[in-house]
Image (cartoon, helix red, strand yellow):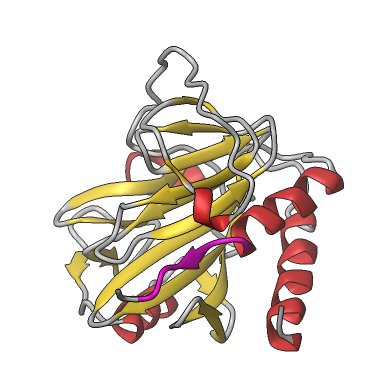
Amino acid sequence: MSTQRQHSSTHRAASIRSSGAAAALLLSIGLVGCAAAQPPTATHAGDAIPLPQNGDLDAGTYLVTSYPVPFEITVPDGWGISEGRMLDSDGVLVLFSNPTSVPSDACAWSGTLTEVDRSVAGFTDAMAAAAATATTAPVEVMSGDFQGVEFDLSVESDVAIDDCSQSHVCIHGSGNHCSRYYNAVDISETYHVFDLDGDRAVISLSLEYGGVDPAMVEEANAVFDSIRFLPDE
């Protein structure tokens, strides 16, 4: 891991721990309950197992095909997957998404969702410009051969959730539909946005509930940093 990557991971862990007792973080997509999947455990990257849609995961390295370029991610025991794109364990969440729109105002968001450019800068700039939320300056990161940026996002301290459209803060969406939102203001998350040869991948790490044990935060950071996009064949 590079010095830059180590620095960003350390900063991210400190940022997540400082969020305190956050309330539940909600997605507009409900988690689907299914029977637990029991795939075999991968021993190294070459044995990556296709990530199932739903269920509990054994420790191992999994192949994810949510984007035009596949990637591998390594998880320990105790993690689960929902809808093929939401990894979670003990109050932490790793989400694979690719939003097409960002609100100009994350609190008064109804009617303000605007389509953003498909580039990394298009999404990152739109997130930074949104009122009611704040982002840190982007830091360059790499995943495999693909370059991207990392930044943290939080809700502005003067935002009152009851004053927001539908009593939640909209982070991003698809068209006019808000697909990622918070129902509380004391929530923060970290984003990795990668350029996949002209396409884009948006992967985020967040606390689903407050009071997460520091050891769990460290574990979640390790899972987040294990993501490696595969080279073109």
Question: Does the image show residue 157?
Answer: no
Chief secondary structure of the magenta span?
loop
Q: Position of residue 170 (x, y in %)?
A: 37, 53
Q: Is residue 29 left or right of residue 211?
A: left
State the residue in front, 30 or 163. 30
Any magenta on residue 119?
no
Residue reaching furthest top? Answer: 35
The answer to which image quadrant residue 14 occupies is bottom right
Q: In the rendered view, would you say 60 is above or below 54? A: below
State the residue in front, 106 or 94. 94
Identify the residue at horizontal 38%, vertical 72% (top origin): 130
Identify the residue at horizontal 23%, vertical 64% (top origin): 101
Q: How many marks?
A: 0
Identify the residue at horizontal 49%, vertical 48% (top origin): 48
The answer to which image quadrant residue 175 occupies is bottom left
Residue reaching furthest right? Answer: 214
Q: Position of residue 220 (x, y in %)?
A: 68, 50
Q: In the rendered view, would you say 105 is above or below 62? A: below
Q: Which residues are magenta?
A: 226-231
Q: Position of residue 11 (x, y in %)?
A: 76, 73
Quadrant location of the N terminus in the rendered image = bottom right
Question: Does the image show residue 214?
Answer: yes
Q: Is residue 46 left or right of residue 108?
A: right
Quadrant location of the C terminus in the rendered image = bottom left
Any magenta on residue 227?
yes
State the residue in front, 203 or 2. 2
Q: In the rendered view, would you say 93 is above or below 192? A: above
The answer to which image quadrant residue 229 occupies is bottom left
